[in-house]
Image (cartoon, rainbow, N blue to C red):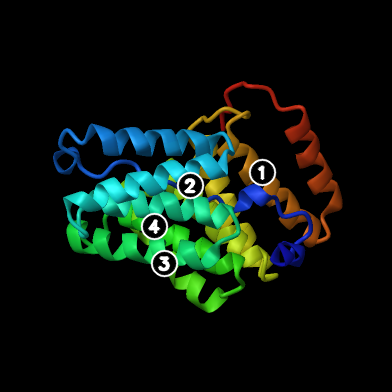
Amino acid sequence: MPWLSKIWMLPTAAFVFGCLASWPADTQGQDTLWNTWRQGGLQALHEGRLADAERLLTAALEQAEKYGVEDLRVADAANDLAVVYANSGKPVEAELLFSRALVIGEKGLGPDHPGVGATVQNLGILYATQERFREAEPLLKRSLAINLKEFGGKHLRTALSLKTLSSFYAIQGQMGEAERLIQKSLAILEESRVREGDPQYTSTLEVLAAILRNTNREQEARDLERRLETAQDTTVYR
C-alpha cells in the first residue's frame, strides 16, 4: 500500500481491523445456524483463508437478516464481513458494510457502546488506508473516547486505540503526536504486565521503533529492534 511509505518501515500490524464480540446475549437466542456460519468464518479469517471467510460470513449475514434488517446480529455479521473485504482489497464493499453495521449498532445500543466503537475504529482505519485522513481522524478519536469512557485509561482496548491513532499520525509525518500516543499505549501494556510475545505488545514496539527511526534516533530504534528479535514469552514488569 502506498500510504505505508509515508513512514519508514511502519509495520502492517499498525492498523488491524477488528471483528466484534457478540452483541448482548439476550439478542442472540438459539440461532445456532447463524452462529455456526459466523464462527467458521471468523476462524477462516484468523487463518488467512479469505475466500472461505467471505463465503461463510456472507452466509452468516444472510441468516442474520432473517431476524430483521435492524437486528443486532446483522450488525455483527456486516462488520465481520467488512473486515474480510477490507483485507481482500475491496474497500467499497467494506465501507458499505461497516456503515451499515454502525447505523444498526448506534440505533440498537447507543453511540457510546464499545461494539459501536469497534466498528467506528474499523471505518476510520479503512479511510486511513485510502488516505481519506479528514474522514478518518474524527472516527479514530471517537473510538478512543468510547474506550476511555467504557474501560478507562489503563485497559488493553484503550491501548489498542492509542496505538491505532498513533499510527494514523505517524503515516502523515506528525511524529510528535504519534510518539506521545504510542508511549501512552506502551505504558498501559507494561503496567498490565503483558508478555513480550503478545502480538499487541510486539506491534506497539514496532510502531515505536519506526517513529524513533523517523526522528533520527537510529541507535534507540536499533536497540528496540534487537529487543524485539530476542523477546521471549516472559512477563514484563514496569
Percent x, y of residue 184? 54, 51
Left or right of residue 172, residue 51 in this image = left
Per the image, the residue denoted by label 3 is 96
Give the quadrant of the N terminus.
bottom right
Mark 2 touches mark 3? (CB < 8 Å): no
Earlier residue among tags 1 and 2: 2
Mark 3 touches mark 4? (CB < 8 Å): no
Q: Amino acid at mark 2?
A: Glu
Q: Residue at x 59, y 36 (%)?
A: 199
Q: Residue at x 46, y 66 (%)?
A: 95
Earlier residue among tags 4 and 1: 4
Relative depth, front residue between 160 and 121: 121
Instruction: Look at discs 3 and 1 and give the one toward the viewer.
Output: 3
Percent x, y of residue 176? 65, 66
Per the image, the residue denoted by label 1 is 205
Instruction: Look at discs 1 and 2 and give the one toward the viewer.
Output: 2
Relative depth, front residue between 8 and 83: 83
Instruction: Look at discs 4 and 1 and give the one toward the viewer.
Output: 4
Left or right of residue 194, residue 61 in this image = left
Decide: is 145 above or below 42.
below
Q: Amino acid at mark 3?
A: Leu
Gap in Å between the C-alphas at discs 2 and 3? 15 Å
What element does badge 2 sit on? helix
What element does badge 1 sit on? helix
What element does badge 4 sit on? helix
Left or right of residue 192, residue 215 in this image = right
Gap in Å between the C-alphas at discs 3 and 4? 12 Å
Q: Can you see residue 205?
A: yes
Per the image, the residue denoted by label 2 is 54
Gap in Å between the C-alphas at discs 4 and 1? 25 Å
